[in-house]
Image (cartoon, helix red, strand yellow):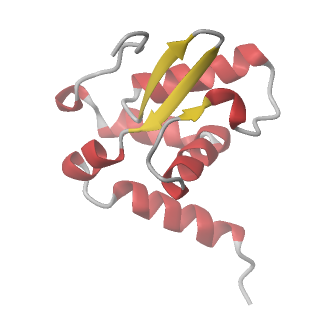
Amino acid sequence: MPGELPIPEMAEVDLGTVLSALADPHRRAVVLELLRGDGGERACSSFPLPLAKSTRTHHWKVLRQAGLVRQRDAGNGTFVRLRHPEFEAKFPGLLDVVAGISTAGSTPVR
């Protein structure tokens, strides 16, 4: 696809690298938003990340290099899509577990 930034093949995706990328709360929030979406592409600028542009760029790069997302440049914007089906094939249920833990952690226990 034109403008698509390089990503690792799923055979090269390492679980430790993925978990390291997901350890950051900002990156995890992005992945959770993409999981809740319709599976389509989203503008990177549409995520409410209260960070400097250079820091946001770094987070996108970490997610991409971990193999979690596909990212492409298009004119004045950059778009991102979660590699959910590919992750389900290699790490069944991993993203759902991360989503469940993250959701459970934000709910007060009574």
Among all residues in the image, which is located at the extreme front? 75
- The foreground one among 43 and 54 is 43
Location of residue 105 (image quadrant)? bottom right
- On the image, the x and y values in percent for residue 15 come to 31, 40
Residue at x 47% of width, y 23% of height: 71
Residue at x 28% of width, y 48% of height: 85
Q: Quadrant of the N terminus?
A: top left
Among all residues in the image, which is located at the extreme bottom? 110
Q: Is residue 88 placed above or below 56 in the rendered structure? A: below
Residue at x 20% of width, y 50% of height: 89
89 relative position to 93: left or right: left
Among all residues in the image, which is located at the extreme left? 11
- On the image, the x and y values in percent for residue 40 come to 46, 42
Q: Quadrant of the C terminus?
A: bottom right
- The foreground one among 17 and 51 is 51
75 relative position to 90: left or right: right
